[in-house]
Amino acid sequence: MSIKFKNLNKTIIKCRKCPRLVKFIKKVTTEKRKQNINEDYWGKPVTGFGDTRAKLLILGLAPAAHGGTRTGRAFTGDKSGEFLFKCLHKAKISNQSTSENLNDGLKLRSTYITNILKCVPPGDKPLKYELNNCSTYLEQEIFKLKRLKIIVTLGKLAFDNCLKIYRKKYNFTKKIKFKHGKFYKLSNNLTLIPCYHPSPRNVNTKVISKTKMINLFKKVLKKNNENN
């Protein structure tokens, strides 16, 4: 990982801008789930991870209370992450089909994963000022990924907030709507693709399936290969 990313991640981990989120993280780490009672929780903001020379950015909303907040890695240790990494492995983006902890040997192929919000919000519902506080970190992550070609957003909130950054940064005015698998041009060099979130609710109600998500990521790889 580059020095610039290491320094950014140190800043993120030390961040205490949002008192409500700091308080909630403390509550989560002291009131552990029964199955995790003997584990040491990460209990801090959760940074992005992966290949800092990535062409693909996968963007979620926030770490899970007993997932990323426990393990220290986004989409790790929770049901959404289990589903996601099975799909990424099938699409040949990750070297393994599970993501359990920071030292499990997981590697991503030209891909970086992060969240809009670096701390878990109560009820998975962030407040506007919390999203605004964290947007500066996401902006830095995006613009430090110098080879970035495609952003896949998991869920509508991730899509809307990513779009907000581009509207502010580049005066992007085109009206676009969340539509799973649709390719939107943000600029000559960057494409935005909305994807349904791999939440247990969406999986159980068949809003998203493994086949649907694997096919989307295969299209992403094909698009990136065309951009070489």
Image (cartoon, helix red, strand yellow):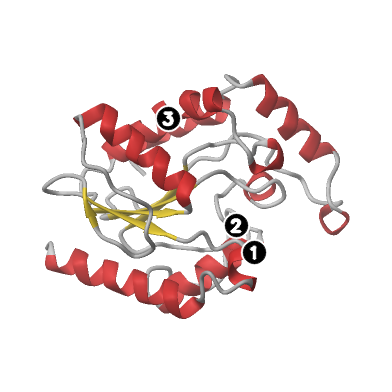
Mark 1 — residue?
A: 201
Q: Is residue 191 above or below residue 129?
A: below
From the image, state whether disc 3 or disc 1 is nearer to you.
1
- Whether residue 4 appears in this view of the structure is no
| Foreground pick, 146 / 21 | 21
Task: Identify the residue at horizontal 32%, vertical 47% (top origin).
Answer: 52
Task: Identify the residue at horizontal 34%, vertical 32% (top origin).
Answer: 139
- Where is residue 132? Give x, y as percent: 47, 25
Q: Earlier in the sequence, mark 2 or mark 3?
A: 2
Q: Which quadrant holds the C terminus?
A: bottom left
Determine whether the residue tagged by mark 2 lies in a helix, strand or loop.
loop
Q: Quadrant of residue 22?
A: top right
Question: What's the amino acid at mark 2?
Answer: Thr
Mark 3 — residue?
A: 135
Question: What's the amino acid at mark 3?
Answer: Ser
Mark 2 — residue?
A: 76
From the image, state whether disc 2 or disc 3 is nearer to you.
3
Determine whether the residue tagged by mark 1 lies in a helix, strand or loop.
helix
In this rendering, position of residue 53 left or right of residue 58: left
